[in-house]
Amino acid sequence: MNLITVDESKCIRCGLCVADCPSCILTMGENGPECNVDRGCMSCGHCVAICPVGAMDNKYTPLAEQVPVPEEKLTEKQAYDFLRSRRSVRLFKPQPPSEEDVLKMLDICRYAPTAGNTQGLYYTIIRNPERIKAIADATALWMEDEIEKGTANKRYFRPVIATYRERNIDIIARNAPMLIFISARRLNITGVSNAEKAMAYAELFAPTIGLGTTIAGFIESCGIAGWEPLLDLVGVPPKHKLVGCMMVGYPRVKYHRMPERQHLKYEFKD
């Protein structure tokens, strides 16, 4: 199969697939859309998804694997309230989430946007309490090393370390029953931004199946910095780098109100 095939009996030559191709590798011929290259396609599937009559097929994103977009949509208010009611959860029940729930949440991450449709994120799921505690300890050591070196983070890290060491409060891993690490291949320079979008999808989907999440910022920063003791505990795959981390569990609390945020700051410019 060439990159694209077109059912000429269905094609209405509307040109939408050509106009919407992010890589600009399609042209409109006499009998419909054409592609004279087999490279450059980012496998986004737009050309197949946009066709109003189902005439287009793409070997990387086959028509047979695409499902119709649901007609039913959230109302504006439903979407607004849903997004606003999401909370970063830091109080968890002790039992880790079921594999079924975790895989449901991570499956939706596959559909988060990635730069150039690079995708390719890898998830390492840790639910052993001793290893999670060791990860928090390794992160604390990294933060203390940053303080000793006098980096820009030292003023921010000092009270965190005091809370963790002197008050014996796990402000780093929050006693989460599960940590999910995200890694990307070392050559993927957009790995961090890709992971952020994937985690955003996970955080929005999680409440629908009873899960709570929050970004494990200290641990994530430690991993992105390449702190070897942490990377050894996580077990990052070969040729990958750590690009994200979040805590996951069943919430121990329920929020009854939606806090306000800073006023919108904006400016229109011509």
Image (cartoon, rainbow, N blue to C red):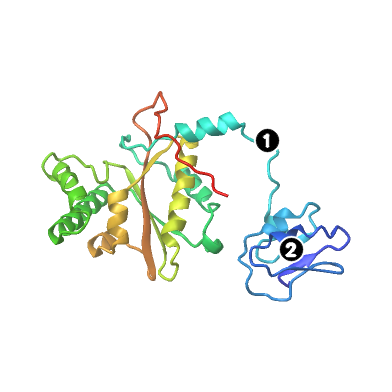
Give the image location of residue 203, x and y in percent. 44, 42
Q: Quadrant of the N terminus?
A: bottom right
Q: Which residue extends farthest top?
A: 256
Can residue 156 be seen? Answer: yes
Disc sitting over residue 72 in the figure: 1
Cα separation between marks 2 and 1: 28 Å
The amino acid type, in three-letter code, at marker 1 is Glu
User: Which residue lies at the image location 46% right of the left edge and 57% below the top edge?
Assistant: 194
Residue 123 occupies which quadrant of the picture?
Answer: bottom left
21 w.r.t. 217: above or below: below
Q: For mark 2, what is the residue?
A: 18
Crowding at mark 1 (Cα within 10 Å: few <14, some 14-19, many 20+): few
Give the image location of residue 161, x and y in percent. 16, 47
Give the image location of residue 262, x and y in percent. 39, 35
1 w.r.t. 167: above or below: below
206 w.r.t. 242: above or below: above
The amino acid type, in three-letter code, at marker 2 is Val
Q: Which residue extends farthest left?
A: 166
153 or 221: nearer the viewer:
153
Q: In the picture provided, is 134 more to the left or to the right than 19? A: left
Mark 2: which secondary structure?
A: helix
Residue 138 occupies which quadrant of the picture?
Answer: bottom left
175 or 21: nearer the viewer:
21
User: Which residue lies at the image location 21% right of the left edge and 42% below the top edge?
Assistant: 170
Q: In the picture provided, is 100 more to the left or to the right than 1? A: left
